[in-house]
Image (spheres, coloured by chain):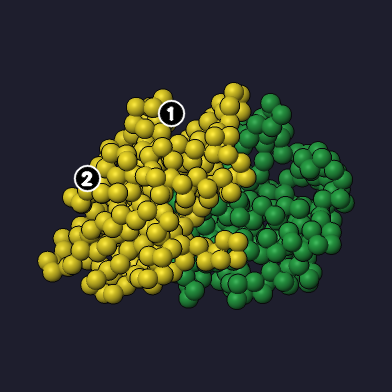
Chain colours: A green, B yellow
Amino acid sequence: MLESGISPLLLYDIPSKASGTAWSPNTWKIRYALNFKGLPFKTVWTEYPDIEGLAITIGAKPTDVRGGSPYYSLPVIQDPNTGAVISDSALIAEYLDEAYPETPKLIPAGTRALQTSFRVAYKHLTEASAQFIIPSIPDILYPRSREYYVRTREIRFGKKLSEVMPVGDAHDAAWAQLKAGFTKVSGWMNDDEPFVMGNVVTFADFVLAGELQWFMKGFGETSPKWQDILTWDGGRWAKLLDSLKGYEGLDEEQYQP
Amino acid sequence: MLESGISPLLLYDIPSKASGTAWSPNTWKIRYALNFKGLPFKTVWTEYPDIEGLAITIGAKPTDVRGGSPYYSLPVIQDPNTGAVISDSALIAEYLDEAYPETPKLIPAGTRALQTSFRVAYKHLTEASAQFIIPSIPDILYPRSREYYVRTREIRFGKKLSEVMPVGDAHDAAWAQLKAGFTKVSGWMNDDEPFVMGNVVTFADFVLAGELQWFMKGFGETSPKWQDILTWDGGRWAKLLDSLKGYEGLDEEQYQP
């Protein structure tokens, strides 16, 4: 593993009331990645309304342009060993591979384009997820983030969050569509191998696991929807999360809102 | 390379009046693949209305279900060395890797899911292509295929093929969207490397090149649209086709309609 002497990297993440505090799919990808690489890190819990100011203060780049303005999002990492500040989970993954070449690779040589295409294809096939999960998120956020989240997501959907989740037949059809998207992804993978690249863990697995964490924390572990997902594709997704359990490790800091 | 003694595989492909006869994106993928592997093959030119009967006769599986009925498409390969008959370009690629393990791999170990995701993501990002290219295809087909193609595509679009290509601002917006899709794919790749996996050719490159052949043959090599594509992304797509020129080789058979 690593030589000692590496100072903990800072991972900026959004807190929740869910067990373990972490819930956001994109920050989960980097939490997994840091643990997978054995890099020491410390979480800096950041409520939504504080993200933009934080990013500007530490020099983190925006990750998008929305309504003509720069848009800032987490994860951001700050690496005291190099002075680097990086936004965007995919760019962070590339940075970690480059800055710590002796740690296991997130993006094996030659697979950068393919790993990116995996994220694009996954997102396309599972776009039905947003209408189910986003309305559940406010319940697990602390008040300042909750207010921000509800306000910004209602603008994005153009309706009340309480009206976003489809009902009746439309609900069942959309849920079936989400399930079918996962079944497609499962079909790309080999039946007897747990990970996207077979028996070797790569960033693509953390993409999937990060999204699954989002569902699990948002719906709740005992919810019928999460329990349903655990049965999909012969239990493949339950097994994937299980196989990656060793890389979940949160640091010890408890969030105090 | 290969030991001698391999009988030519049969590649079932759809003929056109375009130079070189081959034009169909999915059959091009396998034409490239066979040449890349150095496998001898012979093209069996098959007009559209004959595909279903052929497939049933030689035992090629349908590649889709449409309107409740099995749907047959090319490419199909028939391998006299093993007796195998395989439909669907992705399954053919897997078959060729397995049946001829000493030839260069189309799908390097561990990349099956990622290669599949590449095709899904490419198709999603370039879905604007169909409205431009499909109306051009009848002009290069022979009469029996042309009649079949126009009839089936008009059903699919729900309008006359002559009304499919957008006009005015809608044309320019859709063309810009297609260009942006290619620019995204280009952004996944490394600037100084020609292929999806860097400096090594894989099936993903034949997916791109097969689609580019479709544009080139459909629009025509001197058409403004094809000339425009050749300039996109710093000429990356022109260079890709050039780099793969050695794998284009048609067999010598001329098609006689």
Q: Which residue is mark 1?
A: B225
Front tag of 2 and 1: 1
- Check the image and report above or below for A89 versus B65: above
The residue indicated by pointer 2 is B246
Query: What kind of residue is marked 1?
Result: Lys
Q: Which sits in the foreground, A63 or A1?
A: A63
Residue B180 falls left or right of residue B219: right
Q: Is residue A95 visible?
A: no
Q: Which residue is drawn at the image coordinates 54% and 43% (left, top)? A: B127
The residue that appears at 27% across and 62% down in the rendered structure is: B10
Q: Percent from the top left, x then y, of residue B182? A: 47, 37
Residue at coordinates 60% horizontally, 76% vertically from top-left?
Answer: A234
User: Which amino acid lies under the numbered mark 2 shown in the image of this protein?
Assistant: Gly
Label 1 Cα crowd, 10 Å radius (few <14 / some 14-19 / many 20+): some
Mark 2 → mark 1, Cα distance in angstroms = 25 Å
Q: Is residue A216 left or right of residue A105?
A: right
For this orientation, the residue located farthest to the left is: B4
Q: Point out residue B197 in the picture as x, y percentages from the top left corner.
A: 36, 49
For label 1, the SS is: helix
Task: Answer few, some or many: residues within 10 Å of disc 2's Cα (few below 14, many 20 plus, some between 14 and 19).
Answer: few
Q: Position of residue B121 (x, y in %)?
A: 52, 49
Q: Nearer the viewer, residue A148 or A67?
A: A67
Residue at screen point 18% across, 50% down: B252
Earlier residue among tags 2 and 1: 1
Label 1 marks a residue whose chain is B
Quadrant into which the N terminus of chain B falls: bottom left
Indicate the secondary structure of the residue bearing disc 2.
helix
Res. B110 image quadrant: bottom left
Residue B234 falls in image quadrant: top left
Residue A209 x/y as whole percent: 60, 61
